[in-house]
Image (cartoon, rainbow, N blue to C red):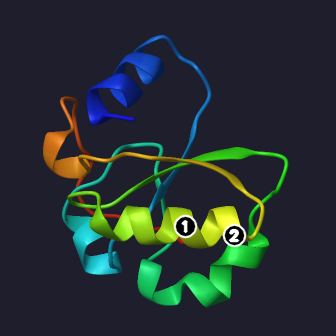
Amino acid sequence: MKASALKRQMDFEVPVNIVDVRERDEFEEAHIESAVNYPLSEITTWIDTLDPAEEYVVLCRSGARSTQATWQMEAKGYKVVNIEDGLMSWPGEVVRGGNGQ
């Protein structure tokens, strides 16, 4: 899925679980408002805490780390969609600061 398609989905208020797999400092610099930060480098600590009944949209800066996370999540049986062009192509507003996890 492209970042623009995710933006359209959010504009129509379709519920979405966004997992941002960038590092915590990157997330604090800029992120999508409803995204939750689960760094790829910590995937072994959070992957089993997700709800298998939910679908997750995974993104990073450019799509490389989210692709890796998506593969690992799919291997665990999660329903996932990768944002292949990452936050670099996000056409909407971003939030700065605040990593409340």
Query: 6 above or below 72?
Result: above
- Relative to residue 80, is residue 41 drawn left or right? left
Query: 55 above or below 59?
Result: above
At x 32%, y 61%, the residue is: 60
The answer to which image quadrant residue 4 occupies is top left
Residue 33 x/y as whole percent: 39, 43
Look at label 1 and name its amino acid: Trp
The local secondary structure at tag 1 comes to helix
Residue 29 x/y as whole percent: 19, 65
The local secondary structure at tag 2 comes to helix
Residue 39 vs residue 93, the one in the foreground: 39
At x 39%, y 35%, the residue is: 1
Query: 86 above or below 8?
Result: below
- Relative to residue 2, is residue 58 drawn left or right? right
**Residue assigned mark 2:** 75
Residue 83 x/y as whole percent: 37, 45
Identify the residue at the far top of this view.
Answer: 12
Residue 43 vs residue 68, the one in the foreground: 68
- Relative to residue 75, is residue 1 drawn left or right? left
Q: Can residue 40 be spotted in the picture?
A: yes
Q: Mark 1 and mark 2 in contact (Cβ < 8 Å)?
A: yes
**Residue assigned mark 1:** 71
- Relative to residue 96, is residue 2 drawn left or right? right
Q: Can residue 99 be spotted in the picture?
A: no
At x 56%, y 82%, the residue is: 43
Q: How many marks?
A: 2
**Crowding at mark 1 (Cα within 10 Å: few <14, some 14-19, many 20+):** some
Look at label 2 and name its amino acid: Ala
Residue 68 vs residue 11, the one in the foreground: 68
